[in-house]
């Protein structure tokens, strides 16, 4: 019995020793990455047909759009050839002037963020206009793959964001944002990509926003179709004034 026990211990020792020699170190798995082509510029100039629709009314306008990167977004609207209004979006606020109604609105980003339960700021609006990623990437983001798209999943506080990036063109084609507490949602869809400068740019887009209010769930839809889009370093003008007789709403 003692010899058998000793033999058994020797065999176990040899097996453990063999296993120890053959032990494979843990592999470090690198996080997946995805390339996203973004429009980069100093100045952007475009002309577009824009449709605004909410629960009460719908307006179809022609718009001239100018952007100074990371600074100002300026829009001029006309309805059937008649000046309809202007919008000035800067780092601090959004100002909308209605020439038809002779009134104007001033919105702060804090006010808009509280209303829609999304973080809204200049950078997000500029990205949405251009079809660029709406939030910057972090190491904790998740990337999923399917045959046509790379899906970038991001979480920023209570908001989950899914960006669908075309695997071939590396352009963002769809963004889905949902706020978990309110279930408010924002969807961006881009299509009809064409060459602008050295990059490709979405000439068509649809922005859908659904949000809860005391009156129920409301929706806003903005559809745009560009007829012209240019980028460059030629300085553009952003003329903007509010007539004294206009009433603030």
Image: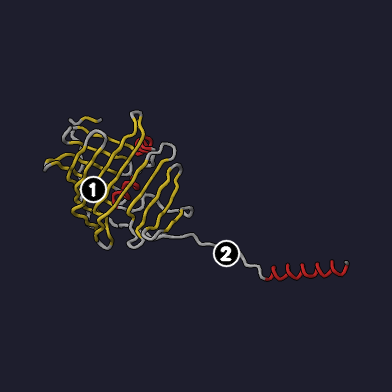
Please tell me which residue is depicted at 66% across the width and 70% down the height of the picture: 22
Report the residue marked by disc 1.
224
Q: Position of residue 79 (x, y in %)?
A: 14, 41
Q: Residue furthest top?
A: 214
Q: Quadrant of residue 51?
A: top left
Q: Position of residue 106 (x, y in %)?
A: 28, 35
Q: Which mark is residue 148?
A: none
* Viewer-proximal residue among 67 and 141: 141
Q: Could you tell me which quadrant the C terminus lies in?
A: top left
* Viewer-proximal residue among 218 and 241: 218
Q: Position of residue 40 (x, y in %)?
A: 30, 57
Q: Residue furthest right?
A: 2
Please tell me which residue is depicted at 23% across the width and 41% down the height of the picture: 52
Secondary structure type for disc 1: strand
Q: Position of residue 204 (x, y in %)?
A: 24, 52
Q: Which mark is residue 27?
A: 2
* Residue 205 horizontal side relative to residue 30, left or right: left
Q: Quadrant of residue 90?
A: top left
């Amino acid at each position: 019995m003692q010899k058998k026990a000793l033999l058994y211990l020797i065999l176990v020792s040899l097996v453990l020793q063999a296993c120890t020699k053959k032990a494979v170190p843990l592999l470090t798995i690198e996080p997946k990455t995805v390339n996203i082509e973004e429009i980069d510029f100093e100045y952007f100039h475009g002309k577009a047909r824009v449709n605004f629709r909410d629960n009460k009314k719908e307006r179809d306008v022609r718009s001239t759009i100018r952007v100074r990167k990371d600074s100002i977004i300026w829009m001029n609207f006309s309805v059937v050839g008649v000046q309809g209004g202007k919008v000035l979006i800067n780092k601090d606020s959004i100002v909308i002037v209605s020439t038809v109604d002779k009134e104007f609105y001033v919105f702060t980003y804090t006010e808009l963020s509280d209303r829609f339960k999304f973080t809204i700021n200049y950078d997000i609006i500029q990205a949405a206009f251009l079809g660029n990623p709406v939030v910057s990437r972090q190491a904790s983001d998740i990337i999923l793959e399917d045959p046509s798209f790379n899906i970038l999943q991001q979480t920023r506080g209570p908001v989950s964001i899914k960006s669908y990036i075309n695997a071939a063109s590396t352009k963002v084609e769809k963004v889905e944002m949902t706020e978990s507490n309110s279930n408010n949602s924002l969807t961006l869809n881009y299509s009809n990509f064409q060459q602008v400068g050295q990059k490709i740019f979405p000439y068509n887009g649809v922005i859908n926003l659904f949000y809860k209010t005391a009156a129920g769930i409301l929706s806003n839809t903005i559809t745009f179709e560009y007829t012209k889009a240019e980028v460059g370093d030629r300085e553009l003008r952003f003329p903007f004034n509010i007539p004294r007789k206009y009433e603030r709403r």
